[in-house]
Image (cartoon, rainbow, N blue to C red):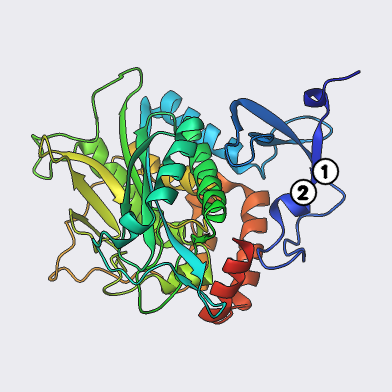
Amino acid sequence: VSSPLSNPVSIAEICFAGLPTSADVPAAPNLSSRNVLTLQPDFSSLRILPYASKTAMVMCTAHNQQTQELSPLCSRGLLQRVLHSAKEDLGIEFSVGAELEFILYRENKDGIMQPVDMSTFGNATTLNEQEDFISTLYDQLERQDIPVELIHSESAPGQLEVVLSYSDDILQLADDIVYARETVTNVAKQHGMKALFLPKTSMMAAGNGSHLHFSFREAGSQHRNAFSDPSQPTGISRKGESFIEGLLDHLPSLLSLSIPTVNSFRRVGPGCWTGHKLGWSTEDKDSPVRVCIDLNTQQASNVELKLSDAAANIYLELAAILAAGMEGIKNGKVLRPMMNDENNALPLPQSLQESLDSLKKDELLLSILGDELSTAYIAVRELEARTETRLEEEVAAALNRA
């Protein structure tokens, strides 16, 4: 009798990369149901799920059914290739951290789903009233070996943030982000609630981001942060500055991958603390690209991308962001001046379609994604851009799925 683990799992490529989030309606003209991919598990990623103790989950890469070659549609495989290129071609290895925001909802006495409280930023209400939920969540994340740095309340009513510890294993961090979101969703259900990662749930409250932090070190070095250089006027190393400039050069296109829905762009604008102009700053929480200062050393420690949310495919997003920064390092790009009120920074795309139009002209990102994946991705996202719905309908749909 063969082992279940030796039996291949397959999926049609159109289902793998050609369906919009709203319906089982193929949207990618270059993909079909005839071509089938096989999924190869990475058993280092296997987790027994505490919220479903008879079930395990494992991450996979997608491969051509006939040749077993890695599929160009596989975003996890793409991230692996980008990380390999960083080490082999540039001699650097990345470190990444992530902040996962979500809002807890519960049905009120009238049967209406609403946030569990009406707290605002820095309020202890959510922490105190949801103590049992937070304790269970932390325990279940720990049982999956997902390192948590902090769980704290955020700006919106019923909003919490889980900060995942900074990691040198970027692929594992991406896996952990997926596992963490699944755990949040299921623990919320165990406590009679629903957790929404939807980027924007109300135009009168803060949205949910999934901020990412980046630094790097010389390959083989275990400790030294090569992003920082106190001798530089900016406090950032030359390579660090070039990484940021590469990120900025491609940011209008990257938004189609990091905030990739119509709802995502509802979270962007003046006063939203996400940044809406093309530029960078140090410790400015309203800048899309923010250089962070270590509170202990007072030195630049990493750069944060605030225009990121849970609607993104984390593997695809990380691969594209790192590739953009790597191009900056490879070409020794000079960092533009810090954004301020006087240097008239250009506005970033204001809609999903505008960012997709930028992606269509971005030779670097198109080459990183490849023809097959980029064509399918743009087709799916453009369909979603054309079928925009009202915010209330987006929230209702998210609650139904949660």
- For image coordinates 46% across by 61% down, the residue present is 259
Whether residue 306 is visible here, answered yes or no, is: no
Q: In the rendering, at what x and y percent does residue 196 appear? A: 50, 62
The residue labelled by disc 2 is 13
On-image quarter of the N terminus? top right
Image height of 40 relative to 388, above or below: above
Q: Residue at x 54, y 59 (%)?
A: 192
Circle 2 SS class? helix
Disc 1, SS: strand
Crowd rating for badge 1 (residues with CA inside 10 Å; few <14, some 14–19, many 20+): some
- The reply to whether the C-beta atoms of the residues labelled 2 and 1 are less than 8 Å apart is yes
Amino acid type shown at disc 2: Glu
Viewer-side residue, 28 vs 23: 23
Amino acid type of the residue that numbered disc 1 sits on in the rendered structure: Val
Q: Which residue is mark 1?
A: 36
Viewer-nearest residue: 388 or 118:
118
Circle 2 residues within 10 Å: few <14, some 14–19, many ≥20: many
